Amino acid sequence: MKRLSVWLSLLLVLTVFLTACSSGKDEKASSTEGKATITVASWNAAADALTEQIEGFNKKYPDIKVEVLHTDTGYSKVTPALAAGTGAPDIIQTQARDFPAFLQKFPDQFVDITDETKKYKDDFIESSWKSVTQDQKIYAMPWDVGPTALYYRIDLFEKAGIDVESVKTWDDYIEAGKKLKETFPDTAMTLYTDDFNLYEIFLNQLGGSYVKDGKINVNSPESEKALLLQKKMKDEGIAINVHDGNGRIPALTNDKVASVILPVWYAGTLSHSVEKQAGKWGIVPIPAFEVGGNTQANLGGSILAVSKQSKNADAAFKFIEYVLTTDEGQKIMLKYGLFPSYTPFYKSEAFNSKDEYFGMELYPFFAKQTTTIKGMEYGPIMLDATKPLKDMIDGVLAGNDVKKMMGTTAESISKSTKLKVNH
């Protein structure tokens, strides 16, 4: 009986051991090889592009089901789940400038993908890695970027006697705007809205940052120059105000504006919203602040990150890899106006095709506008900084003292973020 008891005990131990091994093997298989469902939170055209990716992705990974959740740019469907630590999508899109704030506000909520992205380090525009890196670790993949250019009406410039090639600096641009008004009194050179797009373009062009050395930096010399240029454009009468981005289209349709300073994604807006002006728009690099100065800047761009709440993190990263590092994926992105930060795609036929609306190879032109883009330090402030920044710009345009407005804004952001201010 004693011997039988010993054998039964051994058999029980062996059974438990084998069951544990089998269970571990199945669990690993379910996370890497078995069927999985992943959800992706995205918005607008980006969400549509990701939705169209699913068919091609499933040809390669038939056992991974993908569901795209349409969210808003204010992240109202994402941040509560991150704060609660439960219910978050597997993959989350944020604007590149917002992601450092996500890492700060929701620590330990995003998967460290440093090892997975090592092989792609040289395949993306260098500056695009900045916003997804914290303490030398990578927590998201760069998606698209927004190289900026000057879109101008060829016909209006010619009738006003403006040679666009002679517009080398922003001062030249302002003078050209005055000349335009002599021929077309009811047409402005450009426009501005109640957002801070122009401010960020100018700030990035100058090499400025929202945060520097871990401190609020919106009171910097670069910030002052960016604000004063906007004010000068308004004061000289070459820029008109529209109250939101939608106001641009009527202004363009009715020949109320002769040029716009915006990124690559606005090319799609023009071709779809003012179709009758095909062939009338040209594109050149933005003017510099001084002769021979930098003529490149970035505005916008998004990232894709894997939530640590995901039970299928491996499958989620496979989807990110497919949509961002394959020609098949990037062709669809390009179709929706999302300019890739993934540079190997720049050699593809789709990327180098001629754009009929502008009569030029559109994307190769913008690829050349990415070579000297300066890395922007957003810091963990952008989710709290939007309103103070808008108030700062509005205050300067209204005639308030620039240095005082910058100082007030820096202190306001400091109060909400607990970061100190650079002095």
Image (cartoon, rainbow, N blue to C red):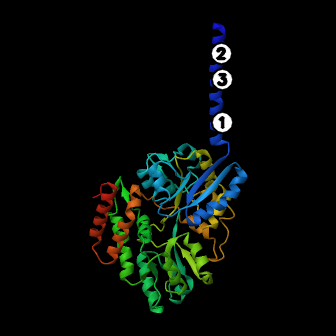
The residue at which mark 3 appears reads as: 15
Residue at (38, 60) in percent of width and height: 384
Q: Specify whether residue 209 is in view.
A: no
Residue at (66, 25) in percent of width and height: 18
Q: Which element is circle 2 on? A: helix
Please state which of residues 219 and 68 is positioned toward the viewer in this rendering.
68
Please state which of residues 6 and 95 is positioned toward the viewer in this rendering.
6
The residue at which mark 1 appears reads as: 26
Task: Tell me the CA gap for discs 1 and 2.
Answer: 27 Å
Residue at (62, 16) in percent of width and height: 9
Number of the label disc, if any, that sits on residue 327: none
**Is 128 left, or right, of 423 in this rendering?**
right
Please state which of residues 62 and 173 is positioned toward the viewer in this rendering.
62
Q: Which element is circle 1 on? A: helix
What amino acid is labelled 3 in the image?
Answer: Thr
**Residue at the extreme top of the image, as rendered:** 2
Q: Quadrant of the N terminus?
A: top right
What crowding class fits label 3: few (fewer than 14 Cα within 10 Å), some (14-19), or many (20 or more)?
few
Choose mark 3 or mark 2, whichever is in front: 2
Measuring from the top left, give residue 305's x and y in whole percent. 53, 52
Q: 22 above or below 197?
A: above
Q: 110 above or below 252?
A: above
What amino acid is labelled 1 in the image?
Answer: Asp
The residue at which mark 2 appears reads as: 8
Measuring from the top left, give residue 382's x and y in whole percent. 41, 60
Q: 298 above or below 278?
A: above
